Amino acid sequence: MLIMKFPKKITKKSNKIDETDYGIYISKDINKNIARLKNDFGCSSDLEVTYFMFDNNKDFICANLYIESLVDRNIINDLSLEMAKLKYEYCNAKPDINSNIVISYFSRIRDSKEGSDYETLYADLLAGDTVFLIDGYNKFYTVDTNADEGRSVEEPTSQTVIRGPKEGFTEKINTNILLIRKRLKSRALRLEKLSIGNITKTTVCLMYIHDIAKDEIVQEMRKRLANIEIDGILEGWYIEELIKDDRHSIFPVFVSSEKPDSVVAALLEGKLAILIDGTPYVLTAPALMVEFLQASEDYYHHYIVASMMRVLRFITFFLTLLVPAIYIALTTFHQEIIPTPLLVSIAAQREGVPFPAIVEALIMEVAFEILREAGVRMPRAIGPAISIVGALVLGQAAVEAGIISAIMVIVVAITAISSFAIPYYEMSNAIRTMRFILMSLAAFLGLYGVFMGLIVMTLHLCKIKSMTVPYLTPIAPKIKGGNKDTIFRFPLWKMKYRPIGISGTDTARTHGHNPVSSDQKEKPELR
Amino acid sequence: MKKLLVILLMISLISLPGCWSGFEIDTLAIIIAMGIDKSEGGYFLTLQILNPSAIAAKEPSTAAPVVLYSEEGKDLKEIMRKIHEKSGRRIYSAHLQLVVFSEEIVEEGINDALDFFARFNEFRTDFYFIVAKGTTARNVLSILTPLHQIPGIKLHESLKNSEQLWAPTKSVRIVELVNAIVAEGKEPVLTGVEVTEEVANVKLPTKSLESLQKSEIENTTKYFGLGVFKEDKLIGWLNEEESKGYNYVIGNVNNTVGYINYGDKVKITGEVTNAKSVMKASLEEGKPAIDVVINMTLNVGAVEGEFDVSKEENIDIFNELAEKKIKLMCEKTVDKAQNEFNADIFGFGEVIRRKYPKLWKEIEDDWDNEFPDLPVNITVKAKTNQLGQITKPFFIKEKE
């Protein structure tokens, strides 16, 4: 056996080390190093240490260390083979094997890195690398043996499309970077890797396109990311919540997307992307209010169709926000503005309903929220049971029992459907909260209260910012010519500039030339 | 702590003064129509109140869709409140469709009653005023109607439709009514409503639901024509023909139908699709005169007898006859208003006042004496647009 475990007694002996030995850099004494490492990892059982010696120099010891659960077995086997080759090559060599020979050998092994301090060593070890320690040499080599376990690229579950790319991000940051790079073959694409989280050391990657992204925003983002101080980052929301401009605002100021194509589109608009290892959601910022009502599919259909869909989404925004509140306000305070035939019909339906409108609305809305929440959390297998209970109990039985009026069921249904038509779940959550506030205002003050609430909400929206950019940007502050992608989606050749206020120096998106017409006259009218 | 206090104060600011004007729909008694009769003490008020549970039922209900509550008293507002003794629900009058006055009330004057309708803020201003002719207002409201479940809405709709499609009625709202009473040189009109007996042998009056289960109706409410007012008092009635003439003169005809005879055998029906009138004042020897020009467009509705409407000369004949007929109709109405009632329901005085304000100042006080002698020249211009789906009648043979 050429490779064998080092006798136990040696490790035991050097387990006791002095406090004075705790330096930043590794020492030349391999036994000391290994003892220190074992001690630091608390003799963690998956820390694997393998020694190997050479026949022609029994005092010269090398060791490799890795964390068993993080490494790919196949690569480790390959590495062992390499070491065996090395041993065989040098078993009778003169002069005796020493550190120089091994070092020169390691520097030839694929993507090996050199390091000298403990912190790097720990980081590499925890990233799944194999660390080689050589006796009499105060540096170490690491070889990437990282096990590439994880989900493969699948269709996104939360943002589905009919037409358009169906690849979704995965939990692996490298795959996600690849998915973006694949779509954006530009050397101007910049990547900055950081590790955030005092304990988790999560890899976070800031991505932007040089010149297209605004420099001030990039610097601001860099500063904020660097200033994050927390034990761990498990999902993008941690970052969003920690670095958003207005911490208490309920409205999302980062778009979280599962789709590489929407991230690339955001990058092309001069936005920044933040990729977080371990989550398939990529954040893009600055995010504007209107962005949460735009779906990536808007750009994959004819502009008239897309504009229609978008107008519909704006309508659903107001429907889901206001329908229950306005229903309550009208039926309890302003019966005079309901058309008479409708009032007769509402009065007929409300006959015998034992609750006031607000209680009725709250019962139904809360019941719906419970259904929704239950549907999200429970195991997939019992999903249909919930919908049956929901449809029968809430829809039919409640009306037939005379507890809820039929029109209230319609109100809740239209609210619920509308809330699902909003492409981003974060936004529909925010609106849901606002809806309950407006409902209670409507119950107390009628339309007066509803509009007071709306005014306060609008003021708030005007106030908040996303990465220093005002949230309502092309609308308030109004940007002349900047509304080509707000409510209506203009044809691509009409959207000549990237969003003003977000993008950097390179603002031209297209020159608007028509590839079909033979007239190839240059029209340098870009600013 | 201070923040918490501010939030608490804000919540109480919203919640404490809130709710005071809120009423659930199922606690309201929604008034659809209101009838005002005269009683010894003052008014006899009848409210037609919606009965939601009768409408809510999926199966044909045995309960009537409306309930009538009546109460006597001196003051309308007082009676409205007094009715709470009976109704059990809060009387809610924003959806009032219609106010029916009895003839007795309007003959005495409605100024006092109108103040209540103009002042009370719960009323919208879109309900119509009508006068019950030959019956009590309560009787009018007690008739159930088959096509519209709610009689008050039926009366409202049929007044609107008969004005738009048939022309001898006029929907008058509070603002228009008050303006006509107050204006100098203009008198109001109100449409009359009667209770008719559709079938001669009345066994079941349409006051019970069983009678609605048949397609024949024993009696129903029907509009009659216009009641002519002098100030706020009713002084007489125009019949259907005269009411139409009135609407032609003031330009209130949207769409109506009439026929003319040509010779003995030919009868042509014309559908008026548009009739505009222009009233102009002029001076004839220092005395005011009125010119009314009525422009109307016609469609041929039906032709009886041998008359080829596809020929241009025949259309000219048709136009001429129509002009004559409308002119006669209008002149009769004007004549009746001038000589029988001496009430300037057309607003001729208003036209003169606008054009000759100084002259009006002189004759204003003496308008009652001047009006009957006011020369009114009526010119009618008719134009035929369409002949309908066919051109000439089927039965005219082609003359080769």
Image (cartoon, rainbow, N blue to C red):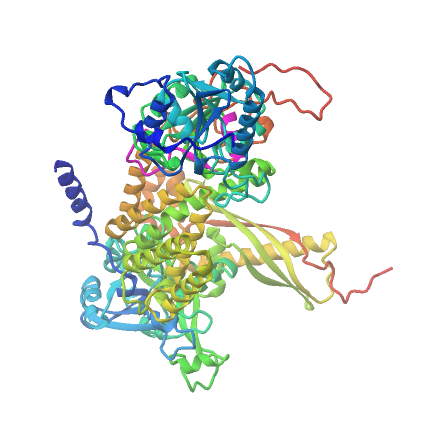
Residue A262 placement (x, y as % from top left): 52, 34
A524 is within the stretch colored magenta: no
Residue situated in front as seen by the camera: A294 or A319: A294
Q: Which residues are magenta?
A: A244-268
Residue A456 placement (x, y as % from top left): 28, 38
| Residue B304 against residue A6 in the figure, above or below | below
Residue B128 placement (x, y as % from top left): 37, 59
Quarter of image, res B32: bottom left
Side of A217 relative to A444 (left or right): right
The reply to whether residue B28 is visible in this rendering is: no
| Residue A191 against residue B76 in the figure, above or below | above
Residue B289 placement (x, y as % from top left): 44, 45
- Total labels drawn: 0
A248 is within the stretch colored magenta: yes
Residue at 18% x, 68% y is B82
Residue situated in front as seen by the camera: A172 or A39: A39
Residue situated in front as seen by the camera: A478 or A144: A144
The reply to whether residue A42 is visible in this rendering is: yes
Residue at 46% x, 61% y is A384
Residue at 21% x, 53% y is B19
Side of B110 relative to B60 (left or right): left
| Residue A33 against residue A320 in the figure, above or below | above
Residue most toward the right?
Answer: B400
